[in-house]
Amino acid sequence: MDVIIEQYFDVSLMIDEFDPVLDGFVQTILLSIFGGVLSLLWGLVLAVLRQLPGRAFAPVRAITIAYIDAFRGIPLLLVLLLISGSFGALALEGVIPRAIGIPTFLGKPDPFWYGVMGLTITYGAYMAEVYRAGIEAIPNGQMEAARSLGMSHGQAMRYVIVPQAVRTVIPPLLNDFIALMKDTSLVSVLGFVEVVQAGRDVQSEFFNSSALTLGALFFLVFTIPLARLVDRLISGQQARFQRAQAGPA
Amino acid sequence: MLELHGVHKRFGELHVLRGIDLAVARGSVFCVIGPSGSGKSTLLRCINLLEAPDEGRILLEGTEITGKGSRDGIDFVRRRVGIVFQQFNLFPQRTVLGNVSLAQEKVLDRPADEARAKAESLLRRVGLGDKIDEYPERLSGGQQQRVAIARALAMEPHVMLFDEVTSALDPELIKEVLDVMRELADEGMTMVVVTHEMGFAREVGSQVVFMDEGVVVEQGPPQEVLERPRNERTQRFLGLVLEH
């Protein structure tokens, strides 16, 4: 028992190595924010593209569906390695712009931005499916009413359908965000020091896992309240749904 | 104002409209009655192009609107034809005022304050002036339906379609909606009303159309069709409906 505590809960080591692990976690947060916001936006774009009506847009729908299937079907780790392995070379050969191939925005090194790209590309696909479920759950009558008032499909989506759909899918989107936050740890394989890598560095130096435990605790400080928030949002929605079904007062 | 010639509509194997001919004069109130599945709703939905007829022609104010698959055709129709649905279909994330002003701003490009003023005046006209900042979920069914009517009227349509608008309402809430429709008719609006409310058809309708199995079986002034129906199917339907 003492050995377990010593290996995982060595408090003095946690205190000594607190700063590097915290710095790593700040990077985790930054990756989560950039990746999260961009994938929320990209997912919405994908969902709208997937919904474009009519024969003229069939190729757009087909490509979007193929994209979503592909990136929900391969591991994020693979995507990250595909990007980091060759984007640099592609940029140097002029195939892609240097700003994308060797990105250094805001002073962050390229593995950070490869990580953001990988997270956005992959989680965008997951979020697109969440948005789609929300959009398809909106009763047809809403679109019919909007179109009957003269709105175009685009206007109906923008002012009537999507605002409703987004409200209802906030809980599953938040769940996907929590998953994304945890998956930022994969960016460590690109040589970027976020919280997991910081913990591993301490682990290999001291043969002790306490810094990793500390990292885990940092995660829980965020993920547990977020999970409770999701629960509250869901039960709030249930209550309103039941009131709406019961009919007006 | 509105003409239908030989309109057919199929949904897969189901032949819902089997040749409809109708001429709706300006200012008239056509009440369409008939059993479920007779194609009444489909008829309305063809008029505002929510459904596209498979055969036949529809003319609105002399302009043919069928066969125009392009956006222009649909715009032409939707800016002249308003529709009120059985399920209200109000936008829940907007206030009552927001519901009535949204399409004015986005489709008619009206400035926000003008749209708002028009919305307020219409809502007062349907008796909901004090509810403009409420959300639809807090209103009764009758109130929501009156908002839906105001919302359609805000677009200044030339024809108003009503698709069984009182069928989902509790009985005590039906009158307030029919009263609004009656006033609208008195003001000269051209209306096509699918309804089971025979009293309304008798008192407000200028023509009653009885539909069954996708065709117009009988048509005429309410005194004739409702009091002295000539066709046996009409008689049977009215016998069943007026029984209770």
Image (cartoon, rainbow, N blue to C red):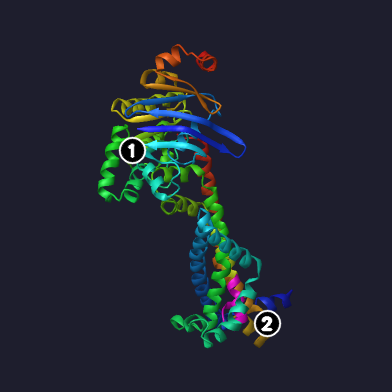
Which region shows up in magenta?
A: A183-197
Write down the chain letter for disc 1.
B
Residue lying at the far top in this picture: please name it.
B228
Q: Are marks 2 and 1 on the same chain?
A: no
The overriding secondary structure of the stretch rendered in magenta is helix
The residue that disc 1 covers is B157
Residue at 51% across, 30% down = B19
**Is A196 included in the stretch rendered in magenta?**
yes
Amino acid under disc 1: Pro
Given this view, does label 2 or label 1 mark the residue nearer the observer? 1
Mark 2–mark 1 distance (CA, rounded to whole Å): 76 Å
- Is residue B8 in the magenta section? no
The image shows residue A242 at horizontal and vertical percentages of: 53, 40
The answer to whether residue B143 is seen in the rendering is: yes
Q: Which mark is residue A208?
A: 2
Residue B160 horizontal side relative to residue A194, left or right: left
Mark 1 residue element? loop
Q: Residue at left 29%, top 28%?
A: B188
Residue B65, given in percent of the width and then of the height, sits at: 41, 41
Snapshot quadrant of residue A176: bottom right
Q: Is residue B110 or residue A72 the one in the foreground?
A: B110
* Foreground pick, A132 / A34: A132
Residue type at mark 2: give it: Asn
Identify which residue is drawn at 52% across, 74% down: A31
Secondary structure under the numbered disc 2 in the rendered image: loop
Among the 4 quarters of the image, the one containing residue B89: top left
Q: Is residue A154 above or below residue B163?
A: below
What's the residue at 51%, 73% (across, down)? A29
Q: Quarter of the image containing the N terminus of chain A?
A: bottom right
Placement of the C terminus of chain A among the 4 image quadrants: top left
Percent of width and height locating residue A168? 51, 51
Chain for disc number 2? A
